[in-house]
Amino acid sequence: MLPPALSPARKQRERSTGGMASNGAEAAENSAKPLPWK
């Protein structure tokens, strides 16, 4: 379970990214710049 403080922020991210809270933001950055581990 996520802490109450992170819940609302994560829900807003999931809505804007279409269900991918963390991956949505990372995918946007990775598409614009080369992946650091490749």
Image (cartoon, grey):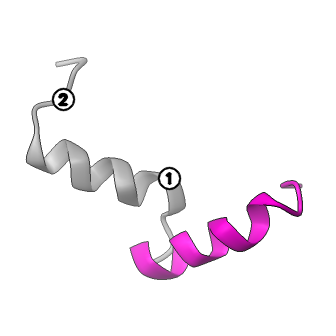
Residue 34 relative to residue 25: left or right: left
Q: Residue at x 75, y 59 (%)?
A: 6
**Magenta segment includes 9:** yes
Residue at label 1? 22
Q: Residues within 10 Å of mark 1 (few under 14, many from 20)?
A: few
Disc 2 element? loop
Residue at label 2? 35
- Give how far across and how far down residue 32 sits, in percent: 10, 48
Q: First in sequence: mark 2 or mark 1?
A: 1
Amino acid type, label 2: Leu
- Give how far across and how far down residue 17 sits, in percent: 41, 73
Part of the protein shown in magenta: 1-17
Amino acid type, label 1: Ser
Q: Quadrant of residue 10?
A: bottom right
Residue 34 relative to residue 29: left or right: left
Disc 1 element? helix
- Give how far across and how far down residue 4 sits, in percent: 89, 63
**Magenta segment includes 4:** yes
Where the C terminus falls, by quadrant?
A: top left
Q: Residue at x 14, y 49 (%)?
A: 31
Q: Residue at x 25, y 17 (%)?
A: 37
